Image (cartoon, rainbow, N blue to C red):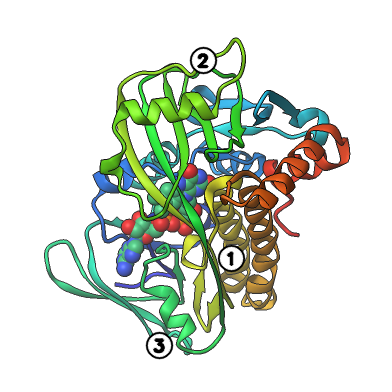
């Protein structure tokens, strides 16, 4: 087997990269170790920045997004007794969209299987090789158990945090930064019409709570919990009680309904640099992780592959290396901006049990809710900064 770009991982990063390359006449093959059903059902992110919506639309994937997605013009920031609305168009002229990552992935898979580049599910033993030379390859075993070799011009490692690509880059050197946080998110999906027009980010002495939604009839809610806690300790009643208390405001209630999914998500910041070794390029969660408070993970993956698609097209069509040589540094500038914003939102909203921290957090929240400059800084970062930054 031979292709121009061998892509490891069919998450949003790998699938979108393949699509963007195909639109520019570059071949690729996507290798995924899970099944199509598993990949399409994985509940993860749900907020799309403006640039992500624009990129998906330009790639011919905007129809269902614009039909079924929900455009959001701001967020509510809450601390006890106060719920303040940040109006994004007024502050920075941009909006965000609520459209689940599951739906983004379904749209990308459908486009790929409808005449797009090959997408192979349920492969195993995937290994990028000879990435320092001009003729790298990927060895893998296909779904029938047959060993295969995919000869490539370049390889994209879009295989997420636990993938095989990043270790190949880091064994040649580079640097890792990591911060684990002393809290986690307990997330639920519920068949309940959202009781709010915009997402509510709530600071509360018991811990952070987030009210978000996936559709007019499905709510997605989160509670700050201890990372060592077990989901078995959280009955549906206990979760709804916690959400009601932490999101409480006069004259308003959380709307409840059957819980269809619940899990605990640890929180970490992680950056691996460089995002390249020879002819192997990393993008998305393979190179960096952010805590979900800033809603950046999926958007960063889209930003990476937008840059990478342009750089690889220049390399493979014109033989020019300037953009691939700049790729890692350019992508990392945005990665660090989003890493800072995600850390900042996380630090402002999650209680630590320390009274001094609590007063600092409340002071910061009051500042964002009363100063247009402080609110604009949040709005610009939340809705997404330009891709080349
Ligand atoms: C549990 C969870 C919840 C999240 N919730 C939120 C949220 O609420 N808000 C938010 O903004 N972000 C959230 N994120 C982050 C966001 O979902 C990610 O940033 C996004 O999925 C990154 O896309 P990606 O394509 O880079 O990686 P991934 O989506 O991880 O895709 C990588 C793909 O590679 C495949 N793969 C892995 N190893 C191999 C291999 N060896 N061979 C072949 N294929 C392989 C995987 O199966 C997967 O399909 C969450 C992440 C997780 C893990």
Question: Which residue sits at x=53%, y=34%?
Answer: 210
Q: Nearer the viewer, residue 155 or 282?
A: 282
Q: Which residue is mark 1?
A: 313
Measure the alpha-carbon separation of dots 3 and 2: 58 Å
Q: Which numbered dot is residue 253?
A: 2
- Counting from the top left corner in percent of width and height, residue 30 is at 36, 60
Q: Nearer the viewer, residue 244 or 23?
A: 244
- Classify 385 as above or below 326: above
Does residue 166 lie above or below 266 as drawn?
below
Q: What whole-number distance in Å separates the C-alpha atoms at marks 1 and 2? A: 52 Å
* 313 relative to 118 in the view: left or right: right
- Circle 3 packing at 10 Å, graded few (<14), some (14-19), many (20+), is few
Where is mark 3, residue-wise?
130
Q: Residue visible at 51% across and 15% down? A: 253
Q: Nearer the viewer, mark 3 or mark 1?
A: 3
**143 to the left or right of 197:** left
Q: Residue furthest top?
A: 251
Query: Marks 3/1: CA distance?
Result: 21 Å
Tag 3 and tag 2, C-beta contact below 8 Å:
no
Between 360 and 342, the one lying in front of the other is 360
At horizontal 50% and vertical 80% (from top left) the residue drawn is 279
């Amino acid at each position: 087997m031979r292709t121009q770009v061998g892509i490891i991982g069919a998450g949003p990063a790998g699938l979108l990269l393949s699509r963007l390359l195909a639109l520019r006449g570059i071949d690729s093959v996507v290798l995924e170790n899970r099944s199509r059903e598993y990949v399409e059902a994985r509940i993860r992110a749900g907020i799309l920045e403006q640039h992500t919506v624009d990129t998906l639309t330009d790639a011919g994937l905007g129809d269902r997004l614009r039909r079924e997605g929900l455009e959001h013009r701001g967020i509510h920031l809450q601390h006890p007794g106060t719920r303040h609305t940040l109006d994004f168009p007024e502050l920075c002229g941009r909006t965000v969209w609520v459209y689940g990552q599951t739906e983004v992935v379904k749209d990308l898979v459908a486009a790929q299987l409808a005449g797009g580049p090959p997408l192979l599910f349920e492969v195993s033993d995937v290994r990028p090789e000879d990435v320092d030379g001009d003729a790298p390859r990927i060895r893998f075993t296909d779904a029938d158990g047959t060993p295969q070799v995919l000869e490539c011009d370049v390889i994209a490692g879009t295989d997420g945090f636990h993938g095989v690509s990043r270790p190949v880059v880091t064994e040649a050197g580079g640097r890792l930064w990591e911060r684990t946080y002393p809290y986690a998110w307990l997330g639920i999906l519920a068949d309940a019409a959202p009781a709010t027009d915009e997402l509510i980010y709530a600071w509360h002495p018991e811990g952070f709570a987030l009210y978000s939604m996936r559709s007019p009839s499905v709510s997605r809610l989160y509670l700050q919990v201890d990372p060592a806690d077990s989901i078995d300790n959280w009955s549906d009643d206990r979760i709804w009680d916690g959400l009601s208390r932490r999101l409480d405001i006069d004259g308003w209630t959380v709307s409840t309904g059957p819980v269809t999914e619940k899990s605990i998500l640890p929180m970490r910041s992680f950056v691996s640099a460089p995002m390249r070794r020879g002819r192997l390029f990393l993008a998305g969660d393979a190179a960096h992780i952010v805590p979900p408070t800033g809603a950046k993970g999926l958007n960063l993956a889209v930003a990476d592959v937008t840059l990478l698609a342009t750089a690889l097209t220049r390399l493979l069509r014109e033989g020019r290396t300037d953009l691939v040589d700049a790729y890692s540094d350019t992508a990392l500038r945005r990665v660090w901006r989003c890493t800072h914003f995600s850390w900042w939102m996380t630090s402002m909203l999650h209680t630590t049990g320390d009274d001094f921290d609590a007063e600092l957090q409340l002071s910061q929240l009051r500042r964002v809710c009363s100063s247009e400059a402080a609110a604009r800084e949040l709005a610009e970062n939340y809705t997404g900064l330009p891709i080349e930054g």
